[in-house]
Amino acid sequence: MTIKDFDWSKLDGMLMFDASKNLCSRELGVSDETIERRIRDEHGCSFSEYKKKQLEKTVLKLKQKLIQMGLKGNLGALIFALKNLSDWTDKVTQTTEHKIAKLAELVEQQSE
């Protein structure tokens, strides 16, 4: 296999779905070392780093789809997106202030 024969499109497609290096090498008909070498020569990084970049593209597409679904009225997608992509929460937060120092001061004043 020559450098021109290396199927980047197939590799990228598999990595979008978190495929292992071993699975990629079997599907491409090359060794693990060949994949590492091609990625290092072409992109200047390791298999793991390149795979992470491909997965980031998948995550971005999934986030975009989730937001689209929420905006189209899918209540579950809307709630999930709000909770996971922002600081939105449906939990009620209560704040209670204790003013013990002032209370002790009032009690002391009344006892004088």
Image: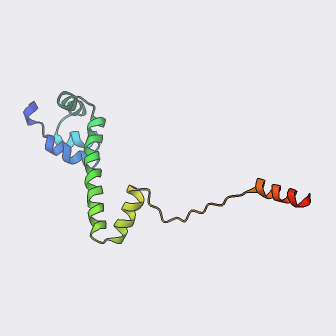
Tell me: 91 left or right of 101: left
Closer-to-camera residue (40/58): 58
Tell me: 111 left or right of 92: right
Closer-to-camera residue (17/83): 83
- Which quadrant holds the N terminus? top left
| Position of residue 10 measured from the top left corner of the image (x, y, whole percent) | 16, 45
Q: Is residue 38 above or below residue 101?
A: above
- Which residue appears at 40% of the width and 57% of the height? 84
Task: Count the labels in the image.
Answer: 0
The image quadrant that residue 94 belongs to is: bottom right
The image quadrant that residue 69 belongs to is: bottom left
| Position of residue 73 measured from the top left corner of the image (x, y, whole percent) | 30, 72
Q: Is residue 66 above or below residue 5?
A: below
The reply to whether residue 94 is in sight is yes
The reply to whether residue 1 is in sight is no
Q: How is the image coloured?
A: rainbow
Q: Is residue 12 above or below residue 64?
A: above
- Which quadrant holds the C terminus? bottom right
The image quadrant that residue 85 belongs to is: bottom left
- Which residue appears at 71% of the width and 58% of the height? 98
| Position of residue 79 measured from the top left corner of the image (x, y, whole percent) | 39, 66
- Which residue appears at 35% of the width and 66% of the height? 78
| Position of residue 70 measured from the top left corner of the image (x, y, whole percent) | 31, 66
Q: Is residue 22 above or below residue 61?
A: above
- Which residue appears at 55% of the width and 65% of the height? 92
Tell me: 87 left or right of 4: right
Tell me: 106 left or right of 72: right
